Amino acid sequence: MRVPFPDQGKNDGLPSQDQPVHTSFSLQNVRPFDITSERIRGGQRPGTVLAYTTRIVGDFPIIAMAEIVTTYIEPE
């Protein structure tokens, strides 16, 4: 059975058995063009480099960040 690489990306609008050709319902950290071999065959997305070497909260890494919006009404 031949399974082509999903070079047209992710399509999560259909059930997995009804996917258009060259798409997938589940992709993570991949891209269609492999820069090391300079051809379309699927490659791993490159990692990132840390911007800072010091940690913000001591020995604990930041797991998730969120934005919290509040409204403050000053009493009269």
Image (spheres, helix red, strand yellow):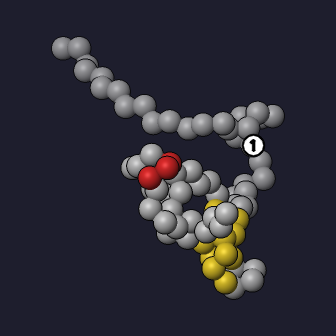
Q: Residue visible at 77% across and 48% down?
A: 54
Mark 1, residue position: 55
Camera sees residue 31: no
Which residue, as the protein is rendered here, is positioned at the far right? Answer: 59
| Mark 1 neighbour density, 10 Å: few (under 14) some (14–19) many (20 or more) | few
What residue sits 25% from the left and 21% below the top? 73
Q: Nearer the viewer, residue 56 or 33?
A: 33
Q: Which quadrant of the figure has residue 41?
A: bottom right
Image vertical order of residue 73 relative to residue 43, above or below: above
Residue sitting farthest toward the front: 1
Q: Can residue 39 be seen at all in this image of the molecule?
A: yes
Residue at the top extreme of this rendering: 75
In the rendered image, residue 74, in percent from the top left (x then y), is placed at: 25, 19
**Residue placed at 50% from the left, 48% from the top?**
16
**What percent of the width, then of the height, locates residue 30?**
64, 62
Closer to the camera, 36 or 17? 17
> Relative to residue 65, is residue 68 drawn left or right?
left
Quadrant of the image for the C terminus? top left
- Above or below for 73 versus 22: above
Q: How many marks?
A: 1
Please tell me which residue is depicted at 78% across the width and 53% down the height of the picture: 53
Residue 46 in picture, x, y percent from top left: 70, 66
Q: Position of residue 35 (x, y in %)?
A: 69, 79
For residue 52, side relative to residue 27 (left or right): right
* Amino acid of disc 1: Arg
Does dot 1 land on a helix, a strand or a loop?
Answer: loop
76 lies left or right of 37: left
In the rendered image, the quadrant that contains the N terminus is bottom right
